[in-house]
Amino acid sequence: MNTSEMEAIIIDNVKQILPEKFEIEPGTKLLETGIDSMSFIRLVVLLEESFDIVIEDEEILLENFANVGTIRSLIERCLPNKS
């Protein structure tokens, strides 16, 4: 999966938890959208399901969910190595 495909899936997941009024782009600062704790946990679950990963508790930090790019980096760390 390339970067743009991954980011498209992330954006789709974020749109599922936020009100429709927000336009989400790779640089959108998610904390400025008014995301609450329940939506945040829902996003974690959606990402885990979409990418078939487990996001460890110690990785569930606000800085890892600042924007689409930081979420992509987190997901890349959680994906199994393809060696």
Image (cartoon, rainbow, N blue to C red):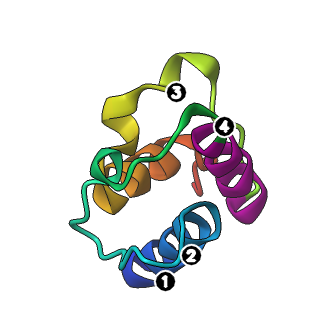
Evaluate if marks 1 and 4 touch, with contact meaning CB atoms under 8 Å apart: no
Which-is-in-front pick, marks 2 and 1? Answer: 2
Evaluate whether residue 1 shows in this view: no
Residue under the image location 62 percent in, 60 percent down: 17
Q: The residue tagged with tag 2: helix, strand or loop?
A: helix
Mark 2–mark 4 Cα distance, whole angstroms, equals 20 Å
Mark 2–mark 3 Cα distance, whole angstroms, equals 19 Å
Q: Which residue is mark 1?
A: 5
Q: Earlier in the sequence, mark 2 or mark 4?
A: 2
Which-is-in-front pick, marks 3 and 4? Answer: 4
Q: Amino acid at mark 3?
A: Ile
Q: Which residues are magenta?
A: 39-51
Residue under the image location 76 percent in, 55 percent down: 52
Main secondary structure type of the part rendered in magenta: helix
Which-is-in-front pick, marks 3 and 1? Answer: 3
Residue under the image location 51 percent in, 50 percent down: 75
Q: Amino acid at mark 1?
A: Glu
Mark 2–mark 1 Cα distance, whole angstroms, equals 6 Å
Magenta stretch holds residue 45: yes
Q: Amino acid at mark 2?
A: Ile
The dot on residue 9 is 2
Q: Earlier in the sequence, mark 2 or mark 3?
A: 2
Evaluate if marks 3 and 1 touch, with contact meaning CB atoms under 8 Å apart: no
Q: Earlier in the sequence, mark 3 or mark 4?
A: 4
- Quadrant of the image occupied by residue 3: bottom left
The dot on residue 38 is 4
Mark 3–mark 1 Cα distance, whole angstroms, equals 22 Å
- Quadrant for the N terminus in the image: bottom right
The dot on residue 60 is 3
